[in-house]
Image: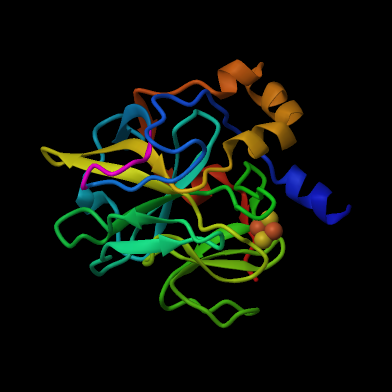
Amino acid sequence: MNRRDVIKSCSMFAVGTMFNLINFEDVLASDSDKGSYKVYKKTLLVKEDGTPLKESDIQPYTAFLFFYPFKSTPCYIINTGHEVKPVEVKLKDGKSYKFAGGIGSKKSIVAYSAICPHQWSYPTKDFSLLNYYSPTEKSETTGKSGVIQCCAHISVFDPTNGGTVLEGPAEFPLAAVVLQEENGNLYAVGILGKDQFNEFFDLYKSDMIEQFGSLEKAKEELDKTVVMEVGKHVKEQIKC
Ligand code: FES
């Protein structure tokens, strides 16, 4: 199996029609202070029993998986355990966007698309090469901790710094999920940064159709999305 096959077999969901693109033609978003980000359906984060997810449900240093903005596109939500400050995320082409930082009482909760911006590896039901490493867990290949690392070609991203690339072939940061907290409930409302949805759906079109019945169904947006332990969805998290 070649690398592309490996990545492809890693595939999974999502697609979408872009809703209400604000400002940019194809990317950037900044929020919180009402900058620009791609607005998608406002989606309530819920637990597996269907009740709203609360900040206290997100234990520190653990990644949880949910799907947003489409029923097929996976994301990770992480409580980093400490304040994640706003940061200007710079891209190689000189553009930049503002990442608003974490939310919650400690401003420690962040969420990112779990589609690798290098060649679109993502957590499937069988395995995931793109995984979160807690601060006490060291990557064997890079020696890094507290990062999101993709073992397809070893790209490393910093969840405490807007998803920026720390090393590897990836040229774009992980796209961030714009989160809002209202009355103790958590909502996903948009995507900030260079999303990979078009590439993802192009590459995994047949997988999406097989899994969801059609691309249109894979691109459905949700009113609610279940936040679960990664192991509830992925059989094997491959770390390196
Ligand atoms: S797909 Fe190549 S590093 Fe993730």
Residues shaded magenta:
33-38
Quick check: which quadrant has ligand 1? bottom right
Report if residue 34 lies within the magenta region.
Answer: yes
74 or 179: nearer the eye? 179
Q: Is residue 204 visible?
A: no
Q: How is the image coloured?
A: rainbow
Camera-side residue: 72 or 237? 72
- Extreme right residue here? 1
Residue 138 percent across, percent down from the top left? 52, 79
Q: Is residue 25 left or right of residue 22?
A: right
Tell me where residue 223 appears, x and y as whole percent.
34, 23
Q: From this viewpoint, is residue 35 visible?
A: yes
Query: What residue do we see at 33% from left, 48% from top?
Result: 30
Q: Identify which residue is drawn at 79% across, 51% down.
A: 6
Answer above or below: position of 33 versus 138: above
For the image, the number of numbered tags is 0
Q: Is residue 180 above or below residue 130?
A: above
The prevailing secondary structure element of the residues shown in magenta is loop
- What residue is shown at x 54% (from left), y 23% (from top)? 219
Q: Nearer the viewer, residue 36 or 199?
A: 36
Percent across and percent down for residue 126 are 67, 45
Q: Quadrant of the C terminus?
A: bottom right
Q: Is residue 139 magenta?
A: no
Q: Is residue 130 above or below residue 232?
A: below
Q: Is residue 157 rendered to the left or right of residue 55?
A: right
Residue furthest front in the image:
94
**133 over 14 or under it: above or below:** below
Tell me: 52 left or right of 195.
left
Q: Going 32% across and 32% down the picture, which residue do you hit? A: 49
